[in-house]
Image: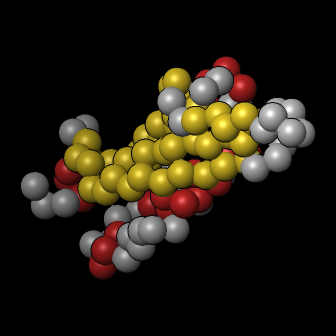
Amino acid sequence: MALKRIILEMGHGNDMHGGDYTKAALRAVQDCIHHSSLIFLRTLKIDVSALEIEVTIGVQKPEMVDQEKVAASLPVGKATVKVVKGGLDVPDDERGGATVIATAGVAVRVDEKHLGA
C-alpha cells in the first residue's frame, strides 16, 4: 500500500489560564481540521475509515499531552499522534502559571489506488 499525502493543515490552540497542554493541543488540532473540507472524498467514493491521519503537536512539555485524547478527537480515519518540543509557554507573573500555546500539523494520507495514480 503506497500512501499519498492529500492534505496538510496547520493550526494553533491555547489554554489561557489552566496550563493544560492537552487542552491546548486539542484546540490546535480542531483549528487544523476546521480549515478543511474533504468533500472530494465523497466524489471519489473514498472510504473515510481508510484515511491515515498523522498529527504532530508542538508544546513546551510534550510529556504532558494525552496523545490518546488527541487521536480520539479526530472525526475520521486512523490517527497517529506525535508530540514534540515546540509551541510556547507565556508566563503569568501576576497569577502564576503560564498560558500554553500549542501548534499542530495534521496530514491526511490515502492509499494511491483510490486516487487513480
Q: Residue at x 47, y 37 (%)?
A: 56
Q: Is residue 102 visible?
A: yes
Quadrant location of the C terminus? bottom left
Q: Is residue 44 left or right of residue 58?
A: left
Q: Is residue 96 left or right of residue 112?
A: right
Q: Residue furthest right?
A: 95
Up the image or down, 75 lies above or below 63; here it is below
Q: Is residue 51 visible?
A: no
Question: Residue 66: image x %, image y %?
Answer: 71, 32
Q: Residue at x 89, y 39 (%)?
A: 95
Residue 38 or 32: which is nearer the viewer?
32
Q: Quadrant of the rendered structure where residue 18 is?
A: top right
Q: Residue furthest front?
A: 94
Q: Residue at x 43, y 40 (%)?
A: 54
Q: Residue at x 51, y 25 (%)?
A: 84
Question: Residue 99: image x %, image y %?
Answer: 72, 42
Up the image or down, 55 lies above or below 117; here it is above
Question: Residue 81: image x %, image y %?
Answer: 53, 34
Up the image or down, 7 lies above or below 21; here it is below
Q: How is the image coloured?
A: secondary structure
Question: Residue 32: image x %, image y %?
Answer: 49, 58
